[in-house]
Every structure is written in C-alpha cells, then in structure tokens.
Image: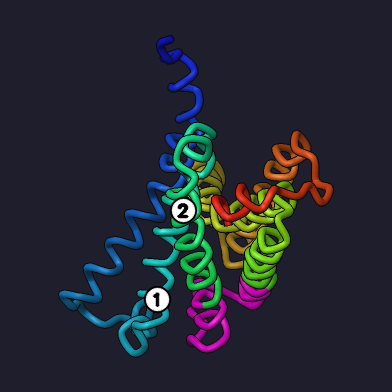
Amino acid sequence: MTANPVGRRSSRLPVVLILLLMAIPLLAGGYRLVTLAIGVDITPENVRFFSSPVPVVLHIVGAALYIVLGAFQFVPSIRRRHPAWHRRAGRVAFVSGLAAALSALWMTMFYALPASDGALLQAFRLIFGWGMVGSIVLAFLAIRRREIARHRAWMMRGYAIGLGAGTQAMLLLSGELIFGKPDVVASALLMGAAWTLNLPVAQWIIRGRPLGPIRLSRATASAVG
C-alpha cells in the first residue's frame, strides 16, 4: 500500500509554517552570533552583548534548537514511526528550551536596559519568560507521570511562547508599514500582543486533545519520555 502524498504534504505543513514564521528571528540570531565571533564596532545598542556574551549565545543556540526540533514534533508520522528519535529530540528540546528561557530572563534582569526598550517590555519579558519555564517544567513532570495528553498540552503552551519572536517580527513590521515606526510603549504593546496571540492559538489546538491524566503503558512511556 503506497503512502498518500497529499497526507505527507499536509503532515509537514506545520513544520514549513513554523520555520517560515521564525525565519527572521533565526536569521537575526545567526547574524548576532557572527558579529560576536568576528567583532564589530561597539555601539550603545550592542555593548551589553559584547560585555557579557555567554547569555546571548546560550539564548540564540538554545532557541534555535528548541524551535527547529519542536517543529518536527508536530509531525504525527515521526512520533509513530520513530519513537526513539522523538524521545531524544524531546530531551534536547527540553534542555534547549529551558536554556533559551532562562538566559532570556537573565538578560532581562541583568543587562542594562537599552533606550529602545522600556519598563513595560521588561515586565512582559519576565512574565512570558517565567511562563515558558513553567510550561516546560510542567510538561516534563507530566511525561514522568506518563500523562501524555497533559505533557503535549504544556509543551505546546511553552512552544507557543517560544514562537513569540516570530509573531513579534510580523506585528512590528506590519505596524511600522501601516502606522510608522512605533514608540517605546507601542513597540512593547505589539510585542506583548504577539506572545498573547500565540497562546489562544495553542489552546485552540490543544482543545482537540483530551487534557485529563491519560496514562501510557510502561513500554509506550519509555519510548516517548
């Protein structure tokens, strides 16, 4: 029996859409790593990265791994046919997601606040950063208890927050094209709106799955967790 090519394409569609959404942040992160490696002129906007590069490197690498590996977790055929890969990728995504979120929190709390940011954006970053950490930890605890539906739900919520960078790029670009360059408050509101917008979308997807403590058999749990 041959596989349905339409089914294969539709199952890969989420991966394509996620990578397109995150193209700008991933490219920007790669550019930041290159500038840190080769060195560029120090400006008020980038001095914090050169004075303390480890957090930003951890954030960029962790976020890239989390986003790319997480995108492929949406493909049902991979989860069914390659459970060992799903388990290993999930472990890497867990660590990289925490690294991305915790390094972002560190930068928010300890980097000097640039003029283009403000107290409101700093508050949003703290709220959603801790929300991402909490979601990933709750997902880990759920899979340890073999509660697969709850694990997927919390991982999806954490992943939705992680995708905020892509939604922010779209909203900021659209807002600037329509209304002109936003000020500090408007920029913060648009970035906060991007994080907020992603969560209802994730919840809408989750509602198609049971959220009760559905438990796996021991053999299945060892394959996915």
What percent of the width, then of the height, locates residue 187? 58, 60
Residue at disc 2, secondary structure: helix
What's the residue type where badge 1 is placed? Val
What percent of the width, then of the height, locates residue 60? 39, 67
Q: Residue at x 63, y 64 (%)?
A: 136
In the image, 11 versus 64, the foreground residue is 11
Q: Which residues are magenta?
A: 103-126
Dot 1 or dot 2, earlier in sequence: 1
The colour scheme is: rainbow
In the image, 119 versus 1, the foreground residue is 1
Name the residue that disc number 1 marks.
Answer: 56
Residue 207 falls left or right of residue 120 = right
**Image quadrant in which the C terminus is located:** bottom right
Which label is found at residue 67?
A: 2
Q: Residue at x 60, y 75 (%)?
A: 118
What percent of the width, then of the height, locates residue 80? 52, 36
Residue 15 falls left or right of residue 155 = left
Q: Residue at x 66, y 72 (%)?
A: 130
**Image quadrant in which the N terminus is located:** top left
Point out the frontmost of discs 1 and 2: 2
- The rendered magenta stretch, by its main secondary structure, is classed as helix
What's the residue type where badge 2 is placed? Ile
